Amino acid sequence: MTLPLNPAMAATFPPPVMEARRWLQGATFPPDRPLINVSQAAPVESPPLGLRQALAEAALNDPQAHLYGPVLGMPALRAEIAAQWSLAYGGSIAPEQVAITQGCNQAFTAVMSTLAGAGDAVILPTPWYFNHKMWLDMQGVTTTPLATGPGLIPDADQTAALITPATKAIVLVSPNNPGGVEYPAETLLAFLTLARAHGIALIVDETYRDFDSRTGAPHALFTDPDWTDTLIHLYSFSKAYRLTGHRVGAVVASTGRLAEVEKFLDTVAICPSQLGQIGALWGMRNLAQWVAGERAEILARRTAMHSGFHALPDWRLLGCGAYFAYVEHPFAMDSDVLAKRLVQEAGLLMLPGTMFQPAGSAEGKRQLRIAFANVDAAGIGQLFARLAALRL
């Protein structure tokens, strides 16, 4: 007998990063050409020593580190985010408008669970972050694709025509995953105005805000005195503080919205990890200079990616920033086929654009995402040497 399966779960696709890892099964990589893995946007090194010592100290000596905590997170961390975000964005954010989650994916699922259900619709620009699409599929929510064109920047005027009575939210990721592009402040403001006019939510995922190439605030949305009626902001501590395994994210939204988010979080996790929150708080209070150094290194690698593709005229760099380069390849095959061949023939693991676009998308078949953040200058040089040598 076969047990029942939720058809909404069956309708979505397998986790893309896990699927890509399966391409490595049976593959061998000689010592002079080791695998270059640019498939996942996650730090591979441990947090800095001071943060690890803070975690160890808490694990050994703070009994509260091993107990349930508040569903919406540690008050001190909520207050720190509110204070630092208010300063960074030039707006007014209160601690009670901040919730802590088990990573930013959970932040998205928690917020979306309060906004949309089966039969509703949510607008996602393409190429999209695949986990956003997967969650909407699992909930029976229709994903409305918003094409962004060659510059990968969504257009609010174009989006207006996609809004229907079923539409509950627009989701923007900036700096973008997978595209790497940084949305201009005026673009984000136009989307806030559009969403407010239609009575729907604007969700802005700023997981990669710490690696934005621009100085100053990336937008002025929090300076709007009525931002809580439309805007929901998401963040992750995984990237800037290397806390991927500790799962710490955040939601900034109205207190009324967070009261609904609390229902979801209490049901799925009860509370965020205490140790993860301790690490995040310590990082926010002590690692500003270190994070600035990390940002500088990522921006240097971004420059190297631009230079490398400039020397590969048959490739087209569509977007580059934060952790990602999003490119159009020159080969006469679909990107999902090409990505598998790159493992065998070049020792490169990257994700095809078919994982970031609607099924059958012609654009997705021409595109690849390169998560370059974990590759140093020498590795980036080797990456381009291998791409230049390809004869497929």
Image (cartoon, helix red, strand yellow):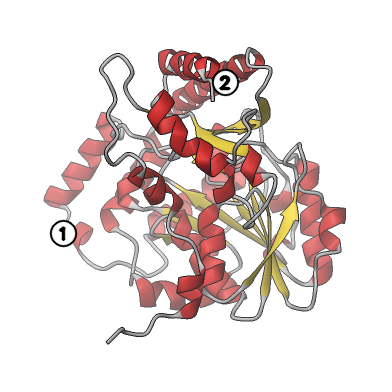
Quadrant placement of the N terminus: bottom left
For this orientation, the residue located farthest to the bottom is 1
Q: Residues within 10 Å of mark 2 (few under 14, many from 20)?
A: many
Q: Please state which of residues 157 and 284 is positioned toward the viewer in this rendering.
A: 157
> Nearer the N terminus, badge 2 or badge 1?
1
- The answer to whether residue 166 is seen in the rendering is yes
Question: What residue appears at the point 81 percent right and 49 percent down from the top-left corner?
Answer: 155
Residue position for label 2: 305
For residue 290, say whether it is visible. Answer: no
Q: Position of residue 21 (x, y in %)?
A: 35, 44
Q: Which residue is mark 1?
A: 63
What residue type is disc 1 on? Answer: Pro
At 63% from the left and 52% from the top, the residue drawn is: 357
Q: Residue at x 61, y 67 (%)?
A: 254
Q: Secondary structure at mark 1?
A: helix
Towards the viewer: 335 or 48: 335
Please determine whether, in this image, residue 74 is positioned above or below residue 85: below
Q: Position of residue 108 (x, y in %)?
A: 52, 62
- Residue 115 quadrant: bottom right
